[in-house]
Amino acid sequence: MKIEKLTDNKIRVILKPKDFKDGDINIKSLLLPTPESQSLFLEILNRAKEEVDFDTEGHKILVEAFFENDDIFVFTITKYIDSNNNSLTTPKKYVTAKKKNYTLNSKLGIYQFKTFDDFCDFCNSINNITNYNRIFKSAILYFYNNSYFLVINGFSLSNKSVHSMHAYLLEFSKFLTNDSNFEIKLIEHGKVVIKNNAIKTGIKYFA
């Protein structure tokens, strides 16, 4: 089990079958409201508090799950503070995790970030992937219609890390399209913010 603190209010948890006592467990079953899954979830929250100082006591939380197969289960936990009442007496609410398919099947991917800070947060998270620059050939960041668009060309679909990178992207951005026509629109009407290797530049200066 690996726990990473993304922000003060958000963590990522990566689980594999070997993390369970029963190696034959189907990790997708963690989405079911069973006593076993609730017990594991509470264990994760306790470890997160000890390892990365992520305390959810008194907060509402949102769990978002990402999985491609039975070999890896990635989910994020976000805690919210009631703007009208920041007291720790706020009842804790476990929100049902929602499954997201992050299979990538195209060499072109265009992702939409709401803010530049979201892009910087992504760069900070992707820095944990070894040799991330081998996953794709080029990455350019555009500004268009009050949003930031990361255009990644030449995804190496045979690279085992490509789906992990795609999952990280989905945590901070929206997968918009793999249509080259939209890339042409960005080239013609968008403003280039970071050319060449936008991710490498983002990690170097903003992560």
Image (cartoon, grey):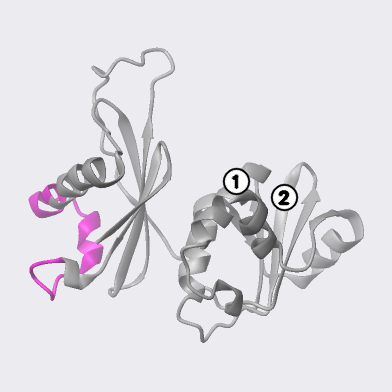
Q: Which residue is pictured at 61% across the width and 58% down the height?
A: 203
Q: Which residue is mark 1?
A: 118
Work out whether residue 57 can be spotted.
Answer: yes
Whole-percent x, y for residue 197 in the image: 72, 67
Q: CA distance from mark 1 to mark 2?
A: 9 Å
The quadrant the N terminus occupies is bottom left
Give, as a single range, the part of the protein colored magenta.
Answer: 20-39
User: Mark 2: which amino acid?
Assistant: Tyr
User: Mark 1: which amino acid?
Assistant: Asp
Whole-percent x, y for residue 175 in the image: 60, 59
- Callouts 1 and 2 close, C-beta under 8 Å: yes
Q: Is residue 141 above or below residue 53?
A: below
Is 34 a magenta residue? Answer: yes
Locate residue 133 relative to residue 101 in the image: left or right.
Answer: right
Locate residue 61 relative to residue 113 in the image: left or right.
Answer: left
Q: Is residue 50 above or below residue 110?
A: above
Q: Which residue is pictured at 63% across the width and 77% down the height?
A: 136
- Check the image and name the residue furthest to the right: 188
Q: Which residue is pictured at 9% across the width and 54% down the height?
A: 36
Neighbour class for label 1 at 10 Å: few (<14), some, many (≥20)?
A: some
